[in-house]
Amino acid sequence: MKPTPFTPKNRLSYSCSLLCLFLLLNGINGCLIKKDEINNGFRIIAEANLNELVAHIELYNLQHGRYPDSLRQLQHINSFVPIVDPVQGVNMRRNSLFNYGRVGAKYYLFSSGKDGIPHTVDDFYPSIDISDSSKIGLVIPPLKISRITPLPNHSASTPSSSHP
């Protein structure tokens, strides 16, 4: 039997069949994989990226004698440094970079978590073991996250307080 020629009518039929198959598989996939599982996967990636960023930040400090002013400075040296927070990217947030800032001779680094708002309970930090004698400049707040100074690009007004 001779195969049928690939005509425009056959091409349209073939394309429609592929589209239907794609939609069917996508629907099945959507039923099998829940959004929370996808978000958890992005969190795992973000945690690994945070740990990798600590190494890049510390290397920058060794090479330049100070910590970078921003995460984008790291990409001037190595464009593959993971400065984008995958958790924020999957939620289509406008500012999708990890939160970073210098605090004196140290720095903070964290993800804003699922809600995308820095300094809330769902934020998470690099999982680096830091002892008191550690030479790593990473500062991870104990339980009071609000003690961290917000990044300059976040418009959060803080009331001035007077101390006796």
Image (cartoon, rainbow, N blue to C red):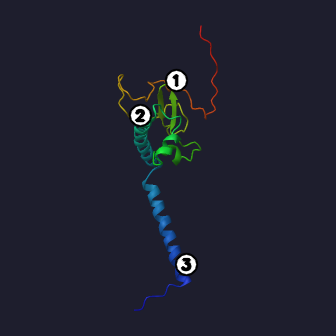
Q: Give the structural element (helix, strand or loop) at label 2.
A: helix
The residue beneath circle 1 is 147
On screen, residue 162 above or below 72: above
Residues at marks 3 and 1 touching, judged by CB atoms closer than 8 Å: no
Q: In which quadrant of the rendered view does residue 135 lie?
A: top left
Total number of numbered discs in the rendering: 3
Q: Residues within 10 Å of mark 2 (few under 14, many from 20)?
A: few
Quadrant, the C terminus: top right
Mark toward the start of the polypeptide (3 vs 1): 3
36 versus 19 height, above or below: above
Question: Is residue 121 found left or right of 136 in the rendered image?
Answer: right
Give me the C-alpha separation between circle 2 and circle 1: 27 Å
Q: Nearer the viewer, mark 2 or mark 3?
A: 2
Disc 3 is placed on an element classified as helix
Q: In the rendered structure, are the residues bearing label 2 and label 3 in contact, judged by CB atoms less than 8 Å apart?
A: no
- Numbered disc 1: secondary structure: helix
Amino acid at circle 2: Leu
Mark positioned earlier in the residue sequence (2 or 3): 3
Q: Which mark is residue 12?
A: 3
The three-letter amino acid code for the residue at tag 3 is Leu
Residue at (36% x, 28% y) in the render: 130
Mark 1 surroundings within 10 Å by alpha-carbon count, few (fewer than 14), some (14 through 19), many (20 or more): few
Residue 62 got which mark?
2
Q: Disc 2, disc 1: CB below 8 Å?
A: no
| Residue depth check, mark 3 versus mark 1: number of the one nearer the observer | 1
Q: Is residue 3 left or right of residue 15?
A: left
Q: What residue is rendered at 50% in x and 77% in y?
A: 14
Residue situated in front as seen by the camera: 96 or 61: 61
Q: Amino acid at mark 1?
A: Arg
- Check the image and name the residue furthest to the bottom: 1
